Image (tube, coloured by chain):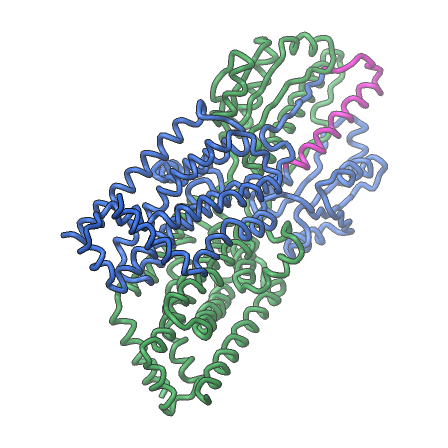
Amino acid sequence: MLTALLRKETIEIVRDPVTLAVAVVLPVIMLFLFGYGVSMDVEDVPIAVYDQDRTQESVRLVEAFVQSGYFKRHRNVQSPREVGAVLDKADATVVIVIPPTFARRLAAGSDAPVQVLIDGAFSPTALIVSNYVTAIVNRFSTRLAEERLALSGLTARGLVRLESRVWYNAPMKTVNYIVPGLFAVLLMAFPPMLTALAIVRERERGTIEQIYVSPVSPSMFILGKIIPYAVIAFCEMLLVLIVGTTWFEIPLRGSLGLLLGASLLYVFVTVGLGVAVSAVARTQVAAVLLSLVGTLMPSFLFSGFLFPIATMPYLLQLYTYVFPTRYFNDISRDLFLKGIGIEYLWGNIALLALYAAALFIAASLTLRKKVAR
Amino acid sequence: MRRLAAAVRKEFRQFLRDWLLVGLVIFIYTADLVICTSALSFDVRNLKLALYDGDRTELSARLVERFSTTEYFDALIPVARIADVDRLLDGNQADLALVIPAGFAQEVAAGRSTAVQVLLAGTNANTANAARGYAATIVGGFARDMLANHAARHGIANALPSVRAEMRIWYNPQLEFAHFMAVSMIVVAALMVGVITAAAGLVREKESGTIEQLVVTPLRSHELILAKAAPPFTVGMLSLAPSVVIAKAFGVPLAGDLALFIVASAIALAAFLAIGFFIGTLADNLQQALLLAFFVLFPLMFLSGTIAPIESAPALIQWLSTLSPVRYYMQIALGILLKGVGLDVLWPQFAALAVTGFALGTWSVVRLRRQLYA
C-alpha cells in the first residue's frame, strides 16, 4: 500500500519539474549569496591621518598601523573640519590625529597622546577596530621605551609577549562559520513549505476525502507524503554540502558518517514541520506564510546562525530551543570547525530525534481525529 | 482626477477590510522592531575564560588579576591540567583560555623575553576577534609595566616615552548594537511591507479575475498602480511614527533632520512598492508571488548592509549592491538617525535612491501595461 502511495506522490512531483528545480537550485544560489554576502571580517580598514607633527616619529606611528595588515591608508587630512567630514561621509572608518607636540613629548620621555576617532555606527566592527588600535599603539609605545632603554645600555626586548592561537577557525574568517550554519538554515527554506503545500493542496482540492475513505491509515498517508519529500530534501542537503565544502573550501574535521546521519535526521524534522504546518493551515497561501513566519524567519534569527544566543535575553534564549535549526546548527558547526565526536554531540542529536518523533506522532494523531470526525 | 480618486477609495476600502494584513504591517513596524532589537546583537559580552597558571607565582597572579578585573570576562575557570583547556574549548564551556607557562616570573625578572598564550575558539569569528583584542590590550598594558619595573630595578629612573591612544567612538560611543539594529529594522520593515503588499494586491486582482474588469474601465495603467500603491504607502508611512519613537527608546540619538528622513522613507517605500508590483507582473497566483517575493527579499536584505557592513563583502557583491535601493535607504537612515548628517553629505545616496526607485517604478508600469493592455 505504501508503495502505491509513494508512486502516486512521485508522479505528482515529476509532473511539476519547475517546482522541483526551484527546490534544488535555489538553495545553492542562496548559499553563494550568503556565503559571500554576510561577512564581518575586519581587514583593510580605511584610515585617514591628520598628521600635525610631520616628524620621523609620527610617520613611524602611521607605518605601524599600515604594517599591521588590518588598516590601509586611505587619505591624509589637512584641517580639523575635514576630520569630521571624513567620518560623516564614511570615507574612512578611523581617523588618527597626531598633535604637533608628538615627537617633542616623546623625546622628553613623557606621555604623548594621539587622538583616534572611530566610526561606531556598526558597533561589532568598531569594537574590533578599537582593540586593534589599542594593541598597535601599545606595541609602538613599548618599542619606543625599549629603544630608549637600549641607549642607556639595558636590553629588554619583548618582556611579556602575547602568543595567540585561534583554534577551529585559524584565519578567523566569517565564511568558515557562516557556511556550516547555512546548511541548517537553507534546509528550513524549502522542505517544510513544499511538504505543507503537498498536503494542503489535497485538502484544497478535496482529494483528501478520498484518502479518508480509503483503507490507508493516517500514519501510512503521512509516511507516503514524508518519504518522497525527505528524499528531495536529502538530495538538496547533499548538493548544498558538496558545493559548500568544495567551493568555499570549508574543511570537515569531524566524521562524515556522523554528519550524514545527523543530516538525515534533520531532513525528517524539516519535512515533519511541513506536516505540522499543513495541520494548521487551510489554504496554500496560509501554508506559505506560516512556514515563512514559523520556520524560516526564526531559523535565521533565533538559531545562533548569525546572532549568538548567549547574548540574548534569557526568555528568548529559551525560545531558541523551540526551533530545531538551533540543534543542527550546533552539530554542523561542531563537526566542521571543531571536529569533535559523538561524546559532545549526543545531546543535540537526541533532541533532534525527539523532535522528529514528536512531530510524526502529533501529525498522525491530528489526522486520525479528522478521519474519525 | 475623479477617476483616480474613485479608484483610490476602492483600494483603501479593500485594504482596510483585510485587518490581518493591516495588523501585520503595524506588527512589523512596532512589535517586530522591539523583539529583534532587544534580542539580536553581535555584542561580545560574558566571555568565559579558562585559566591555566603553570607558574603560580605572585607575578602570574598579578597578570591573572588584570584579566579578572575587566568587565569583558564573565567567568574565570581555573584548570589544573593543560588537557582540561581542550576539553573546555571543545565543549563550548570556554571561549578562550589563558596559558601562563612555568618559569614565567623568573624569565621576566631576568629581563628575558617570555610569552603567555591565549587560545581562542574561532567558531564565531566575530567573538574570537574581539576576545583576542581584549587579551592583547590587557597583556600589552602588563608588558609595558613590566618594562618600567625592569628599568627601575636597573637604576634607570628617568621617565620612558609612551604613546597613549585617546579613543573616541563617534555616533555610538557605548558601542550599542541596538542602535544599529533599530535603524536596520525600520529599513527592513519598509522593504517587507512594500514588496509583499504590492505583490499580493496586484496578484489577488489577477487571481480573482477582477483585473480584467479594471482593464476595461477608463482607468489608465499608471492610475491603477497609483491607486493600488496608495493604501500600503499610507499605512507604511503612518507606521513610521511609532517605529521612530521606539528607536528613540532604544537610545538611537535621532541626531539629524527628521523631515529629511521622512522624505527618504517616502521615496524608499515607493521604490519597494515598485519591486512588489514588478513581482506581481511575473506571478500568476498568490503562492508564486509570495515565493518570488521572499527570494527577492532575502538577498536584498542581506546584501544591502542591513545585517553586516557591505564594505566587508567581496567586490562583486559590492557592485551588485549598488543596484539595490535598500542599500541607499540604509545609508541615509544611518546618516540621519545615527550620525546626524544632512543633505550636503547624503545627496549622492538620495540621488541613487531616487534613480533606482524611479527606474523600477517605470519598468513595472511598462510591464504591467504590456501584460494587461496588449
Q: Is residue A20 magenta?
A: no
User: What residue occupies the far bottom of the structure in this picture?
Assistant: A215
User: What residue occupies the far front of the structure in this picture?
Assistant: B2
Whether residue B17 is visible to the viewer of this picture, yes or no, is yes
Residue at the location (41% across, 73% down)?
A: A282
**Magenta segment:** B133-161
Quadrant housing residue B141: top right
Quadrant housing residue A233: bottom left
Is A266 drawn above or below residue B221 in the view shown? below
Q: Is residue B134 magenta?
A: yes
Rendering coords of residue B372 (x, y %): 19, 54
Residue at the location (39% across, 50% down)?
A: B232
Rendering coords of residue A286 (x, y %): 41, 66
Rendering coords of residue B97 (x, y %): 69, 45
Left or right of B263, for residue A67: right
Chain B painted colour = blue
Chain ID for green? A
* B197 and B218: which is toward the camera: B218
* Image quadrant where one finds the N terminus of chain A: bottom left
Majority secondary structure of magenta residues: helix
Q: How many marks?
A: 0
Residue at the location (58% across, 52% down)?
A: B35
Whether residue B295 is visible to the viewer of this picture, yes or no, is no
Quadrant housing residue A27: bottom left
Rendering coords of residue B143 (x, y %): 73, 28
* A371 and B51: which is toward the camera: A371
* B67 and A26: which is toward the camera: A26
Is B266 drawn above or below residue B29 in the view shown? above
